[in-house]
Image (cartoon, rainbow, N blue to C red):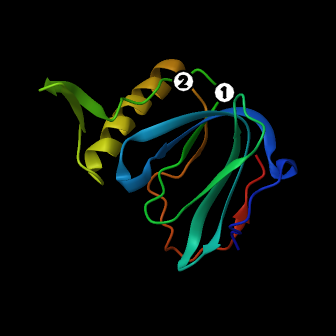
Amino acid sequence: MVKSMKRQKTDLISRKVTLYFSGDMGLAVHKVEARAFFFQIGQYAQYPSAVEVAWIAKGQRLPRQTVQTYKPSMLILEGWGHPDPASMWGEESASGGVVTRAARFSACSSEWQSEFDTMIAAHIEASGAKVVVDFRGHNAFAPTPAVKAAV
């Protein structure tokens, strides 16, 4: 069973990785370079195959954690120095002393993920980057036994 408690540093695997995952409300893809990480698949609420990922970001001391349930988007690549995803913001507009910016796509739009998928596929092909684990397309509703990954 996936526990929602904070992971201890001793649970994490010391290894330089880059994590990519969708932001809140389905907005843009975020990149985090981490020096240690952990992942497992297990029961969480009504999801028999939820994805739990914990990491310690580069330059930080304490672990962070997320549990992805509906439509997990986590992709973990070996090493650091992979490209940043495109910004979520469009062009600025100024009117009457006020500057505004809007997101390039609407919340929960599939365009966020398809744009990222195209960019990262080209990067992996060109650089030979090693995929540690890819949960894009993972079905969190599928009844699978809890698995703790030994990476």
**Mark 2 Cα within 10 Å, few/some/many (few <14, many 20+)?**
some
Residue 15: image location, x then y, percent = 76, 34
Q: Amino acid at mark 1?
A: Gly
- 40 vs 85, left or right, is right
Query: How far apart are labels 2 and 1 at the CA level?
Result: 8 Å
- Tell me the quarter of the image containing the N terminus: bottom right
Q: Tell which of 91 and 137 is nearer to you.
A: 91
Location of residue 106 in the rendering, given as x and y in whole percent from the top left corner: 23, 48
**Residue sitting at x 33%, y 35%:** 88
Q: Which residue is at 35% across, 44% downward? A: 113
Q: Measuring 53% from the left and 80% from the top, which residue is drawn there? A: 46
**Relative height, residue 95 to residue 70 (above, below):** above
| Residue positioned most to the bottom | 46
Q: Which disc, if any, is residue 24?
A: none
Q: Where does the image place residue 95, in percent across and percent down from the top left?
A: 12, 26
Q: Is residue 65 above or below residue 3?
A: above
**What residue is disc 2 on?**
82
Residue 71, given in percent of the width and then of the height, sits at 43, 60
- The extreme right residue here reads 10
Query: Is 78 situated above or below 112?
Result: above
For mark 1, give the secondary structure: loop
Please, what secondary structure does the residue beneath circle 2 have? loop
Question: Contact, CB < 8 Å: mark 2 with mark 1?
Answer: yes
Residue 79: image tag: 1
